[in-house]
Image (cartoon, rainbow, N blue to C red):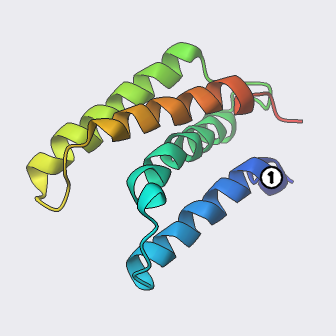
Amino acid sequence: MYLKKIFTRWFTIFVVVFVAHQLLQKVLKIPVPVADSYLDAFLFMPILLHLILWERRLLFKKGESYTLSYADIFILFVVVSIVCEYFFPKWNKQFTVDFSDVICYLAGATLFALFFNKPAR
């Protein structure tokens, strides 16, 4: 029962698009320049925030009507931005600092906050 609520239509579409892009880019070596630059960073925040929302609902027993506050979403956006755009490039040279990723994280977090951060039905 919970799986149907967790794997909403929008969440499933986002995950399928994310995985399909990873397969195109990493396995099949087919470049899609705009998607390669922005898609993963844009989809990352809605996917992550949805999983955190359900973690709180199920593991922390917050209930199905629980939603993330705007403060929670903003804090998670800041943490992800700092970790992905500051610390990862310091730890591993394969990561690069890209401010456009921060804009994509913000856009994805905003999309989640405005349209998908709703009580479960």
In the rendering, at what x and y percent does residue 93 appear?
A: 10, 59
In the rendering, at what x and y percent does residue 10 appear?
A: 75, 48
Residue in the image at 68% along x and 32% along y: 61
In the rendering, at what x and y percent does residue 98 appear?
A: 25, 42
Q: Is residue 16 above or below residue 40?
A: below
Give the residue number, with chain letter if any, for mark 1.
Answer: 9
Q: Secondary structure at mark 1?
A: helix
Q: Is residue 52 visible?
A: yes
Q: Amino acid at mark 1?
A: Arg
Q: Is residue 82 above or below residue 6?
A: above
Q: Quadrant of the C terminus?
A: top right
Residue in the image at 28% along x and 43% along y: 84
Name of the residue lying farthest toward the front = 33
Q: Is residue 8 visible?
A: no
| Left or right: 59 in relation to 96 | right
Residue in the image at 43% along x and 29% along y: 76
Residue in the image at 71% along x and 57% along y: 13
Query: Residue 83 or 105: which is nearer the viewer?
Result: 105
Q: Quadrant of the N terminus?
A: bottom right
In the rendering, at what x and y percent does residue 108 appear?
A: 54, 36
| Left or right: 52 in relation to 41 | right
| Left or right: 8 in relation to 79 | right
**Number of numbered callouts drawn:** 1
| Left or right: 80 in relation to 12 | left
Mark 1, other Cα within 10 Å: few <14 / some 14–19 / many ≥20: few
